[in-house]
C-alpha cells in the first residue's frame, strides 16, 4: 500500500452516513474508493452540483471542480456557482477534505500556491476551509525534498487561519483541540520517534495514542 492510498483509507473512516462532503483535487478524490460498508455520502462540487458520481460513469461534457470528467448519481442536483457557494458559506457542507502544502501548529493552512510558480488560481479553497463544519487535510508528511510540512508557522501564503480540524498523513493522525496540536495515532510500524523527527511543529501526545485504523473495504460511491 502506498502513502496516498493509506491516507485515503484512513480519511474514509472519518465520514459518516448522510454527510455532504467536498473533496479537493488530487489525493482527496481517492477517499470515495474506501468508504466503509453502509456509508452513503453526497459529494458537492463547487462548480455547481450535488451528487458527484464515479468516473467510470462519466457524462460527456461534464467535469468536476478540478476539470476532470465525472458522473452524476441518481437524484443529483445542478445549480449555478452562486448557489453552490451559498451552500458552502452557509455551513451546509459537513466535511471538506483537501490536500496541503503546509499546516502549522495554530491550525493555519497553506495549500494554494508556491511563490514564483504558476497557479490556476485559488478556486474554492478559502470558502471551503472556512465554511465546512469539519476540515481534514490529507497530505504526505514531508515535502519531496524531505522537509517538514507540519510546521511551527506556515511560510507559504495562507489559505486561511485556524481552520484545520485534523491532519492525516502516511505517518500519523493529528487533531486540533482548543488551539493545540495533538498527536492521536501512528501508522502501522511507525514509531513516535520517527514522527517527532519528521514534524516541525510542537505537539502533545494524546493519552489514548494508538495505531491508526485503516479502512480495508474496497468500496464505495
Image (cartoon, rainbow, N blue to C red):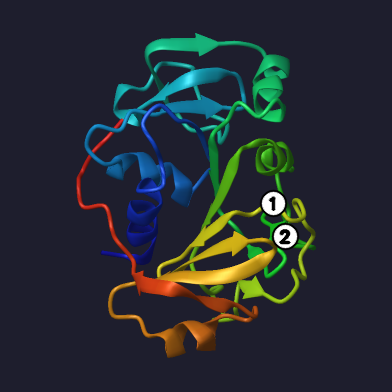
Residue 103 % position (x, y): 65, 64
Q: Nearer the viewer, residue 58 or 93?
A: 93
Q: Nearer the viewer, residue 141 or 209?
A: 209
To which residue does mark 2 refer? Answer: 108
Q: Which of the marked residues, 1 or 2, is nearer the chain's N terminus? A: 2
134 lies left or right of 111: left
Q: Are marks 1 and 2 in contact (CB under 8 Å)?
A: yes
Measure how far apart labels 1 and 2 are at the Cα level: 6 Å
Q: Position of residue 9 (x, y in %)?
A: 32, 53
In the picture of the structure, the residue carrying the numbered disc 1 is 163
Task: Please provide percent x and percent y for residue 168.
Answer: 47, 61
> At 40% from the left edge and 26% from the top edge, which residue is drawn?
18
Left or right: 107 with respect to 4?
Answer: right
Give the position of the N terminus as an image quadrant. Answer: bottom left
- Using the image, tell me which numbered label, if any, was put on residue 113: none
Residue 86 percent location from the top left of the image: 71, 21
Residue plotted at (53% across, 39% down): 95
Q: In the rendered view, does 217 fall on the left or right side of 89?
A: left
Horizontally, is 182 left or right of 211 in the view?
A: right
Write down the quadrant of residue 83 in the picture.
top right
Q: Where 112 sits versus 210, above or below?
A: above
Q: Is residue 171 visible?
A: no
Within-10-Å neighbours for mark 1: few <14, some 14–19, many 20+: many
* SS for dot 1: loop
Q: Is residue 87 above or below residue 16?
A: above
Quadrant including the C terminus: top left
**Local secondary structure at mark 2:** loop
Amino acid at each position: 500500500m502506498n502513502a496516498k492510498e493509506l491516507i485515503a483509507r484512513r480519511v474514509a473512516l472519518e465520514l459518516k452516513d448522510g454527510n455532504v462532503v467536498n473533496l479537493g483535487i488530487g489525493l482527496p478524490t481517492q477517499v470515495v474508493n474506501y468508504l466503509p460498508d453502509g456509508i452513503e455520502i453526497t459529494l458537492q462540487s463547487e462548480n455547481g452540483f450535488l451528487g458527484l458520481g464515479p468516473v467510470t460513469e462519466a457524462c460527456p461534457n461534464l467535469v468536476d471542480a478540478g476539470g476532470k470528467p465525472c458522473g452524476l448519481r441518481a437524484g443529483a442536483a445542478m445549480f449555478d456557482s452562486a448557489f453552490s457557494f451559498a451552500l458552502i458559506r452557509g455551513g451546509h457542507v459537513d466535511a471538506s477534505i483537501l490536500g496541503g502544502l503546509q499546516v502549522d501548529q495554530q491550525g493555519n493552512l497553506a495549500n494554494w500556491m508556491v511563490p514564483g510558480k504558476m497557479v490556476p488560481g485559488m478556486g474554492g479553497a478559502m470558502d471551503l476551509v472556512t465554511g465546512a463544519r469539519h476540515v481534514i487535510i490529507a497530505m504526505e508528511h514531508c515535502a519531496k525534498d524531505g522537509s517538514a510540512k507540519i510546521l511551527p508557522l506556515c511560510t507559504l501564503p495562507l489559505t486561511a487561519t485556524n481552520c484545520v480540524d485534523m491532519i492525516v498523513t502516511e505517518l500519523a493522525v493529528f487533531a486540533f483541540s482548543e488551539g493545540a496540536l495533538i498527536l492521536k495515532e501512528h501508522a502501522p510500524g511507525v514509531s513516535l520517534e520517527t514522527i517527532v523527527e519528521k514534524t516541525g511543529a510542537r505537539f502533545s501526545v494524546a493519552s489514548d495514542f494508538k495505531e491508526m485504523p485503516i479502512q480495508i473495504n474496497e468500496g464505495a460511491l
